Amino acid sequence: MAALGGDGLRLLSVSRPERPPESAALGGPGPGLCCWVSVFSCLSLACSYVGSLYVWKSELPRDHPAVIKRRFTSVLVVSSLSPLCVLLWRELTGIQPGTSLLTLMGFRLEGIFPAALLPLLLTMVSAPAMAPGSSGMHAPRSWARCLTDMRWLRNQVIAPLTEELVFRACMLPMLAPCMGLGPAVFTCPLFFGVAHFHHIIEQLRFRQSSVGNIFLSAAFQFSYTAVFGAYTAFLFIRTGHLIGPVLCHSFCNYMGFPAVCAALEHPQRRPLLAGYALGVGLFLLLLQPLTDPKLYGSLPLCVLLERAGDSEAPLCS
């Protein structure tokens, strides 16, 4: 060994095969294939979710209780099976998240109380004064009656739960290793926004408006659902929980889109517009502090990216 000298030792060190970095192992078949599998999996989930709404043939409108009940069944089945798509994605890409599948999808106990309270508080602070003519929050007896109202259950319970499960909890873990957390926040809502285009079918079918107005309404709906989807994706990443996005989704469905035009025509438009401005200001001021990852413990998606070699993800700190 001594006879080898310095050159011999250097030769041995060069000829020794290097251990591949963990990020390469996480990439499985390769980053290109990983991205294709991720995008195709997300597209399949979106198509399955929307398709489940139309497996039932009916001449009744979407708000009829019978139609809502049947759609409850199909969409709950698809949503329940959606984690299998993430499991299949993991097997095809070879990515090992380093945590359980349910934890990666936001089902965990660590930090659950702040995750349920703080994002909802942030969303409620951003909500301005109630729309003109609104009677405010329902009395307890009205809430009890809501539990038998199919439209209320759809808008406040089933839609927020299933949409956040499919479009956030399942899609973000698949997109993040491919493109990073930042781009995933803005890519994931595109599937969510496009999924709402199916309302065009029923509006054209029942001739609820002119063709131009229907497509204009669909474009507007795509815009604000995409923005909202980016917000709940941000909450999901920063808290590592599904419960926060679900509660915020339910609250926003209850509040509806801000009635800015009605506020402009209201006799008390100045205080109403001041309320809107105050809500936006408070939202921007509290967005970072109330979603500080330190409040919610270890973030599963951030752990996943750290294992892939991206330890400087901005959304993780």
Image (tube, rainbow, N blue to C red):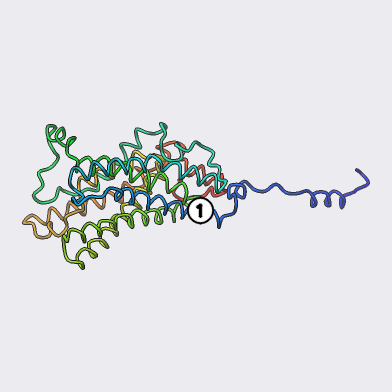
Task: Tell which residue pokes out farthest to the left in this image.
Answer: 267
Q: Position of residue 86 (x, y in %)?
A: 47, 44
Question: Which kind of residue does numbered mark 1 sit on?
Answer: Val
Is 106 in front, or is 165?
165
Q: What quarter of the picture does the C terminus occupy? A: top left
Circle 1: element type? helix
Percent x, y of residue 135: 9, 44
Task: Tell me, yes or no, if residue 208 can be seen here.
Answer: yes
Residue at 56% over, 55% down? 31
Q: Which residue is mark 1?
A: 37
Q: Residues within 10 Å of mark 1 (few under 14, many from 20)?
A: many
Report the side of 224 relative to 59 (left or right).
Answer: right
Taking depth in this image into account, of 70 and 232 the one nearest to the observer is 70
275 shown above or below 74: below
Can you say whether 122 is above or below 264 in the image? above
Q: Quadrant of the N terminus?
A: top right
Left or right of residue 14, residue 185 in this image:
left
